[in-house]
Amino acid sequence: MTTPASGVSDVIVVGAGMAGLTAARGLVARGFDVMVVDKGRAVGGRMATRRFAEGRFDHGAQHFSARSAAFREEVAAWIAAGSARVWFESASATHPALGVEPRHVGSAGMRGIPEHLAAGLDVRTGTLVRRIEIAGNHVRVVADDVRLEARGVVVTAPLPQSLALLAASGIGVAGATGEALESVVYDPALAVMARLDGAAGLGDGHAAPGSGPVAWIADNGHKGVSAVPAVTIHSSAEFAREHFEDDPSRWTQELLAAAAPLLAAAVTASRGHRWRYSQPRETLDIGAVATDAAVPVVLAGEALAGARVEGAYLSGAAAAAMVADRLG
């Protein structure tokens, strides 16, 4: 990783989550000079792993499946590199016709996968992009303390944030596609990281109650992420919408109380985290989207190619191909 600095690249990728890192790697593989910038302190976006109260927690995405041939090949490479492994197998609640599928995780936490993808890339964290300026046949990405120039840009933030950036930059997406982008709605989620005084007792390491405020509980010890008992509790979308702006102490305690009957140990420490753009309710499944800018300014992200980790990967790959074709 590097600190923000001025520079000129072939392509600047905004966002160091799965879509952004996939786009960057795809462009580098085609011979382009690429810089990735992200407002956060670390890569990964919702593929996030955090330390708290001597435990380690995956507090965003908990696992992922691989359904397309392209993504299965990519995941096999991660497994071969030691960055990913199978956690458990189950049928999909949303796609039961697919039958039982492997559920993959990062070998040492979900963030380990984007860290693996970022290796060798020029990634600059702590860089919040304010606007994109078109300057002749170049594009200028303007952050608080830096101006970066390139021949093209890939923007991979959640769609509401990406569209707000385009609006601030005077860049649009014409016609029905633009209207479709504006219509995408994301559900929030509230997460609680809970340190326990003993084993969680979740059997297979996870539980999905099916009703109530808790959507999912994951045992980070069972996953091999934490050396001490530690679970992540995710709220339902309905609970998150109702309580998102509340004091975290309130909803943290409500989620802990709802999860307590499922846990075999008591909570000794806890911390909450808000995910404003946890998951799109619907996806457009069009890969990536070119804006009406005179130079390549392309949108990518899970909302454009199917939700979750696989959708983000597929969209990032589509964006790389689209920008490479435009730049020649």
Image (tube, rainbow, N blue to C red):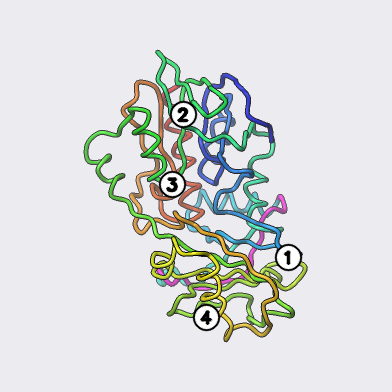
Q: Mark 2 points at which residue?
A: 153
Residue at mark 1 = 53
- Tell me how far mark 1 sits from mark 2, CA to CA: 40 Å
What residue is shown with label 4?
Answer: 258
Q: Residue 158 shows which numbered tag?
A: 3
Q: Residues within 10 Å of mark 3 (few under 14, many from 20)?
A: many
Q: Which of 183 and 65 is in front in this view?
A: 183
Q: In which quarter of the image is the C terminus?
A: top left
Task: Look at the picture and state if 244 lies above or below 217.
Answer: above
Query: What residue is shown at x 67% (from left), y 31% (from top)?
Result: 3
Local crowd size for mark 1, using a 10 Å CA cut-off: few (<14), some (14–19), many (≥20):
some
Q: What residue type is labelled 3?
A: Pro
Task: State which region is magenta.
Answer: 81-94
User: In the rendered picture of this protein, how many numbered marks are placed on residues?
Assistant: 4
Q: Which of 33 and 122 is in front in this view?
A: 122
Residue 21 position within the rendered picture, expressed as x and y whole percent measured from the top left: 57, 40
Q: Nearer the viewer, mark 2 or mark 4?
A: 4
